[in-house]
Image (cartoon, rainbow, N blue to C red):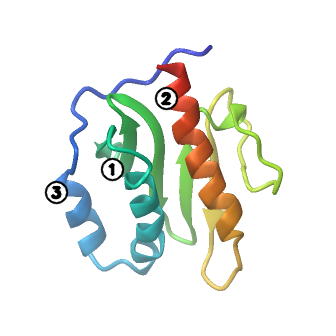
Amino acid sequence: MDALFLLPGAVRRDPEIDAWFAQGDPLRLMIQPWFEELRRCGDDVRELIHDRQPTACVGEAAFAYVGAYTAHASVGFFHGADLDDPAGLLQGTGKRMRHVKLRWGEAHDTAALTGLIAAAYRDMRRRL
């Protein structure tokens, strides 16, 4: 197993994340429901802003984040390279991390992304 990325400042509900979404950026608003999905994964989910991105942890161990950029938004997974991805949503070539890009006007597979979020959460719980 790969080393865990620990973020000791993670809390149950970080008001900075709500402020991040409240800025009104359309891409942030588009990605907000996906962060809510991360929050719903379990009672042990904690969160914080890390590298200017809302990040979800199991306890202190980071498992996913969301980001809003110029032309797209994304849901990223810290151990995404180890996730089963039958729909082929994950992008990236790094050793561990993968992400799913979401763009305005493009359909995305809601069920598959919801499944990846649940799998990333289960994977981190198993690692712990």
Task: Name above or below for residue 118 compared with residue 79.
Answer: below
Q: Which residue is mark 3?
A: 15
**Picture residue at 42% right of the left edge, 59% below the top:** 35
Residue 78 seen in this snapshot: no
Residue 98 in percent (x, y) is at 65, 42
Task: Say whether disc 2 or disc 3 marks the residue closer to the N-terminus.
Answer: 3
Other residues around mark 2 within 10 Å, as few (<14) / some (14–19) / many (≥20): some
Closer to the camera: disc 1 or disc 2? 2
Q: Which residue is mark 1?
A: 52
**Picture residue at 49% right of the left edge, 29% below the top:** 125
- Does residue 34 appear to the left or right of 56 in the view shown? right
The quarter holding residue 25 reads: bottom left
Residue 109 in percent (x, y) is at 71, 69
Task: Name above or below for residue 19 compared with residue 85.
Answer: below
Q: Say which element carries label 3.
A: helix
**Picture residue at 46% right of the left edge, 55% below the top:** 66
The total of numbered circles placed on residues is 3
Which amino acid is tagged 1? Arg
In the image as oriented, which residue stretches furthest toward the left? 15
Residue 55 seen in this snapshot: yes
The quarter holding residue 101 reads: bottom right
Q: Which residue is mark 2?
A: 125
Closer-to-camera residue (103/59): 59
Report the Cα–Cα distance between label 1 and label 3. Answer: 14 Å
Closer to the camera: disc 1 or disc 3? 3
- CB under 8 Å between discs 2 and 3: no
Other residues around mark 1 within 10 Å, as few (<14) / some (14–19) / many (≥20): few
Task: Name above or below for residue 60 compared with residue 109.
Answer: above
Residue 121 in percent (x, y) is at 52, 40
Disc assigned to residue 63: none
